[in-house]
Image (cartoon, rainbow, N blue to C red):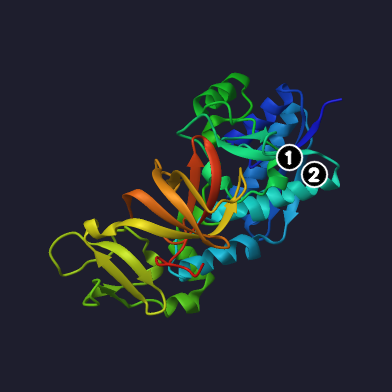
Amino acid sequence: MAERVLLGMSGGIDSSAAASLLKEQGYEPIGATFVISPYSEKRLFHKGAQKASEVCQKLGIEHITLEIDDFEDEVVKPFVESYLNGETPNPCIICNRRIKFKHLFREAEKRNIVKIATGHYARVAYNSKTDRFELFKGIDSSKDQSYFLWQLPQKYLSKIVFPLGNITKFEVSKYIDKNGLIDRETGESQDICFIPKGDYRNFLEKYKPQVVENMKKGKIVNPDGQVLSNHNGFYNFTIGQRKGFHVDSPGKYYVKSIDPHHNRITVTPNKDLFSETMVIKDCNWVSQKEQDKIEGTLKPRYRSKGAKCLAIRLNKGNYKIEFQKKQRALTPGQSAVLYRGEKVVFGGIISKNKGKLDG
């Protein structure tokens, strides 16, 4: 009898390919699509659920929907709070642990299903020497999504199957074309699924209208505190940004820091955006047990190639990162993920605290 596996399906190309590959590999996949109120009423979600159901029908496998009632509290509110705190958050990373894998894991337990799966481009392998499940990059470096999975605990990693981890996006596209499972023009899943067209500024203004209104008409200053211009809301900016403001001063200026408490943005020339150190908080050790010091390659943002560094433990959940070469525009709220080779060691959130924390 085939082993059952509960597969998260968005109705997109990757999860559809994952469903078919799981079946070919001898599993009995069950497709699960989330119904997230009130966002499930949006056309994007409705269309995705319909597509996932159609794919499951073609494959002759079961499809279910899961009612999600904590998305607002677990993902949307922290996202808004982070932006209004002068940070630039990664909602998809929060969603992976607090929503996607949590609810797949719970539903699988209810149904006595051992394995869960998604269409992420990543790999998991068990290390018998350390008795830990280790998370690795997908073999397609251009599509690797291990960065988004650093918050996953061992209890999830021990149950996960990633059917796309050992193949490339090009191979997935060819596979989809060959079996005619889904129209490839269906496209990719949207990055921030609850924000139409990724316009987070408009979303914030509608979500917290009175709060946001009070944050407009702030000052743009240089590092010495000299007022250079005005801005129309600090939440419109992120570290390293050059467009969207004007200062009456020669040269190009970029956002260096955001101070939500004083509704102030500090701008500097590009050369002043580089830092040798930073602090990351809320760290989760993924593939190995926590250490006081460790060397590796750290990605301070998803599209980063990574930079060699030394991570030094400051106190519980907080690490100081010392880079071999200065890094540009390190952004509070973004995730920073440390790798050793292809393996994800740990990850954390870039902190606004640039100095020392009490050890």
| Residue type beneath disc 1 | Lys
Tell me if 116 is positioned left or right of 78 in this view: right
| Residue type beneath disc 2 | Ala
Residue at mark 2:
108
Residue at 43 percent of width and 68 percent of height? 86
Residue at mark 1:
159
Rendered image quadrant of residue 303: top left
Residue 96, position as x, y percentages in the image: 62, 50
Q: Is residue 191 visible?
A: yes
Specify the farthest residue to the top: 178
Residue 221, position as x, y percentages in the image: 25, 74
Q: In this view, does 351 lie above or below 148?
A: below
1 or 2: tag closer to the N-terminus = 2
Residue situated in front as seen by the camera: 234 or 3: 3
Residue at 62 percent of width and 49 percent of height? 45
Q: How many numbered marks does the figure carry?
A: 2
Q: Is residue 185 above or below residue 147?
A: above
